[in-house]
Amino acid sequence: MTLRLDVPIDQSPVPAAVDAYYQFLVDLFPPGPRDRLAIFGTCLEFDITEKSRLYNDFVVRAFADRSVRVSPVPGQAAGDFADRYSTRYTDMVRLIIQSLDSELSPNDQAQIDRHQIAIVAISNDRDHWLQQVDDDWARKMQQLGIDPRLIDTDENTRRRYYDERVMFLTERRYAQRLWGSGGFNSNIRDREVLIGAIRRRGFPDDDYAELYNIYTAIVDEMVIRPRRPDLEIAHGWDEYTIQDPRHFGLPAVFDIAPGLQSIVDPRTILRGSGARDFSVSTKTTITNAHDTAWNASASGSYMVFFRGEINSSNESHFRQSISRIRKISVGFEHLGELQVMRDRWFSSTVFTDNERVKDFLKKHPALAERLSLLTTGVIVGRGLTLTLQFSDINDVQQWGSSSTSGSGGVNVYGYQLGGRGGGSSSYNNHTINTVDQTVTFKDDGTVCRLIGLRVTPVNPEISFEDVGYNSRPIWDIPDLQAEALAALGQNSDVGKEAIISTLRKRRRGGS
């Protein structure tokens, strides 16, 4: 029989572990005057592969394009798509544009509707034509004796495939039919320009012009990336072929989102060298505290020191062994930062210079908070080594027993060990040193982990302190409770809901 054991940092023998970890990253990747480094309770494992460049882009985008908040936040997920930064940002732009569209005259709105109906019809015709081109090409390959299954493995087949495909598409005037004068995409673009002209006539101010340019970029420049690396390899996609208009109807296969990419190729993490390591013991003291930097509270209460399933018969012994850990050492074969950039759909100056955006966010404080911190860098580690040193030789043997973990592996100091579907960071694949009284876990050199994010505030109306303050559960802030009680003129027996209601109003600037 197994049971789940959870030990947070603040209940572990090394309560300085969070601050030591934070200091390690700050020393390697110093934040600028307006930056902060965000660390995670769990350092997620992920793949960077040499053969799937587009999938690597998807992974970086999934990590970098997320709303950053200060834990603990009820319901905050690791990287849910609904809470992406780009989703929140584009929703804001669309809502502003839609609210203004409602002020257009009936005649203007009718013209826009007619153009949008025409766009749908042109799009359907284009997709039908593209499908016919694909069907003709499949028959052409069969006539030529080209086996598409050999494209990735046979150089001669690959070269002949691309040569013949270029000739095939040229004969059918592929580029002209899509983007030439009177082409499908050109006609769609012409209609969109007319729609824009109608809206600009109704709202001639520069703030609207800026928002509408962003809005059209959101619509026009969605970037497709595969959700799995094997798809890219099997189909031979590149940056051009993957943007097939029909792929936009397959969200289960592709990640379809505004463009965000690393400035350098993510594969530099695989090729990078320069080992980095740090350690923390029961006697370690740190001056650069994580909680102080973020104005957060009790980081150790939500960051994992140990989590996993253990045999119930070993529970008491295992708890004792955890209490006798005296030192933790963490090292990486390489640590690197992937700096990110965003396409034309994003402009940070709208938060400071666009009055329409500023007015909108004043009415939507929850959205303003989620948009206040922008990820500008993704910190990735490769080839983790994690060593635990114990005060008792018996604890080394205890941790060396495979009976201490379930099939899901364990999480130690935020690092998942084992349970990776037969991956290379197995809990049971470790080294015991009885002389030094240590147990060492080691990732394969190709296993990458998300270590942290570099974030920058873009909305001066909301400070780091506001995000840290507001992200904490209301009921867990005693000083605010006391303030609310005083405002209510009540004693401590007042109802909890009344206090929470008052706290929420005060946070939003209400009375």
Image (tube, rainbow, N blue to C red):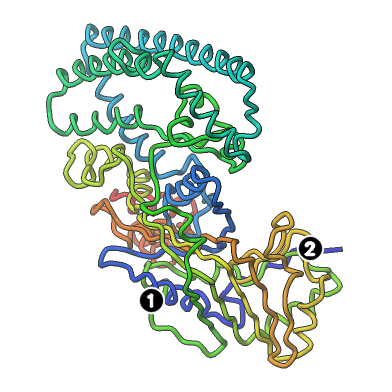
The picture places residue 173, in percent across and down from the top left corner, at 39, 14
User: In the rendered structure, which amino acid carries the disc numbered 1?
Assistant: Asp
Q: CA distance from mark 1 to mark 2?
A: 36 Å
Say above or below: 286 vs 259: below
Say above or below: 421 vs 414: above
Residue farthest toward the left in the current orientation of the protein: 205
Say above or below: 46 vs 92: below
Q: Which residue is mark 1?
A: 27
- Identify the residue shown where x is 45% and y is 24%: 166
The picture places residue 160, in percent across and down from the top left corner, at 54, 29
Q: Would you identify the image quadrant in which residue 503 lies? A: bottom left
Q: Which residue is mark 2?
A: 406
Q: Quadrant of the N terminus?
A: bottom right
The picture places residue 183, in percent across and down from the top left corner, at 34, 13
Q: Secondary structure at mark 2?
A: loop
Question: Of the residues under marks 1 and 2, which one precedes in the sequence?
Answer: 1
